[in-house]
Image (spheres, helix red, strand yellow):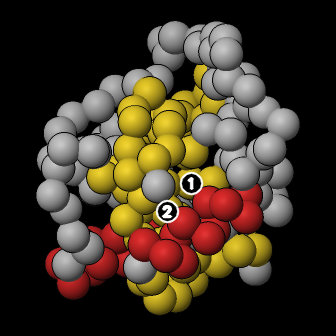
Amino acid sequence: MKVKVFIQNEAGSNRKHHHNEKTLQWRCTVEVSRPYPFPYGFILGTTCADGGNLDCFVITEQRFASGDLLDSEVIGLMEQVEDDLEDHNILVRLPKEAVTITTQIESMLTVFVSHVFDHVEGKQMHIGRFLGKADAEAQVRACTDEDRIFQSVHRTPIP
């Protein structure tokens, strides 16, 4: 399954950018407790129970900037519960990269997600299982906005 991903946060950075996930306008930037291990963003044309788009990590060593739009392929799902709300992450790869989810990648993501909000008192993050492509695609389909058309996207530059 192919998806379009908006990169919100750059790999190697501990800066978390907040955007309006429907208009892609930048709102603010805050620092988090850990640098992102991979480019992180969300899948366009989706809406989850929390009202935001479906979050995802792009499993790649390539560098991308906040605001980049990427064509990606779904390869897995990382179960996550944030403050008692389901907030799973889809794992994607770039179309021409041969990427598999290894135990090392699972460990990197688990440590990151478990500690990224250590600076926020009371924040609770729980990591579940890592699931395969079929489960990830089912999650994307369940969150896909049937009536959304992204013909025109206006992005606000990040200062």
Give me the C-alpha separation between circle 1 and circle 2. 6 Å
Comparing 51 with 31, the one in front is: 51
Q: Position of residue 56 (x, y in %)?
A: 48, 55
Q: Residue at x 44, y 27 (%)?
A: 69
Q: Position of residue 5 (x, y in %)?
A: 48, 39
Rendered position, 133 above or below 21: below
SS of the residue under disc 1: strand
Q: Position of residue 52 (x, y in %)?
A: 74, 48
Q: Which residue is mark 2?
A: 90
Tell me which corner region of the image, top left, top right, bottom left or bottom right, holds residue 88: bottom right
Rendered position, 137 above or below 92: below
Q: Residue at x 61, y 38 (%)?
A: 44
Q: Amino acid at mark 2?
A: Ile
Q: Decide: marks 1, 2 in contact (CB < 8 A)?
A: yes
Q: Amino acid at mark 1?
A: Asp
Examine the rendering and report whether any part of residue 64 can be seen.
yes
Rendered position, 32 above or below 113: above
Say left or right for 146 vs 103: right
Comparing 110 with 64, the one in front is: 64
Q: Which residue is mark 1?
A: 55
Q: Looking at the image, how many numbered discs can be counted on the residues?
A: 2
Label 2: few (<14), some or many (≥20) within 10 Å?
many
Question: Of label 1 and label 2, which has the lower sequence position?
Answer: 1
Q: Residue at x 41, y 79 (%)?
A: 132
Say left or right for 8 vs 143: left
Q: Residue at x 42, y 58 (%)?
A: 74
